[in-house]
Image (cartoon, grey):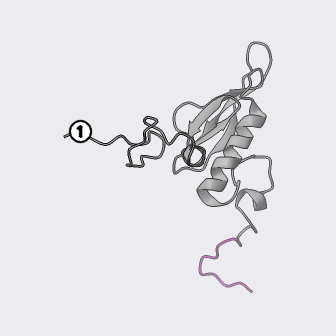
Amino acid sequence: MQSKPVCSICGHGDPYPWGHSCGGTHSDEYEAALFVSIGGKKIPHNDAIWEVKKNRHTNTDGTEWGWIEGAPGNVCWSNNKAFNRQKAGEAVAIHNVEFGGTPAASSPEDPLERRVGGAVPPAPTFGGSET
């Protein structure tokens, strides 16, 4: 018994006469749902919140570099490459909005209110008197 071809992007099970992809019928939509593509990088979404990190040491040419914490694999950025700090921040913002509705970890320099997606919660009380 021969199996039916499926779309390699979305897994749709209908046979496609043009091969193992949807041929553009909805591939862009599914591509965006599965990956963040920016600055020459294609990073798969996962269930973690991402955050841009910077290495304390620079490249040999003095430019900064770092990585995206939480992203699958080793996703590094470098300010002497197309996938630079700005593009890494954009990728993080896109992913985190898809993940949780807020670009919470897009920039560690953002105010706490933005990073937690709203007002800062009050400090917890531990059963003591508040007088």
Q: Is residue 76 above or below residue 45?
A: above
Where residue 40 appears, x then y in whole percent?
67, 28
Residue 115 figure quarter? bottom right
Instruction: Return the x and y of residue 84 as percentages of the image width and height.
Output: 75, 29
The magenta-colored residue range is 122-131
- The residue lying at 73 percent from left, 17 percent from top is 59
Image height of 118 relative to 38, above or below = below
Position of 127 relative to 62 (above/below): below
- The residue depicted at 64 percent of the width and 52 percent of the height is 96
Q: Report how many numbered discs are placed on residues in the image.
A: 1
**Location of mark 1 (residue):** 2
Helix, strand or loop status at disc 1: loop
As drawn, the residue found furthest toward the top would be 60
Q: Is residue 10 magenta?
A: no
Quadrant location, the N terminus: top left
Magenta stretch: helix, strand or loop mostly: loop
User: Is 29 rendered above or below residue 82?
Assistant: below
Q: Position of residue 55 (x, y in %)?
A: 69, 29
Q: Outermost residue, front direction? A: 17
Residue drawn where x is 55% and y is 44% of the image: 27
Picture quarter containing residue 87? top right
Q: Amino acid at mark 1?
A: Gln
Q: Nearer the viewer, residue 43 or 110?
A: 43
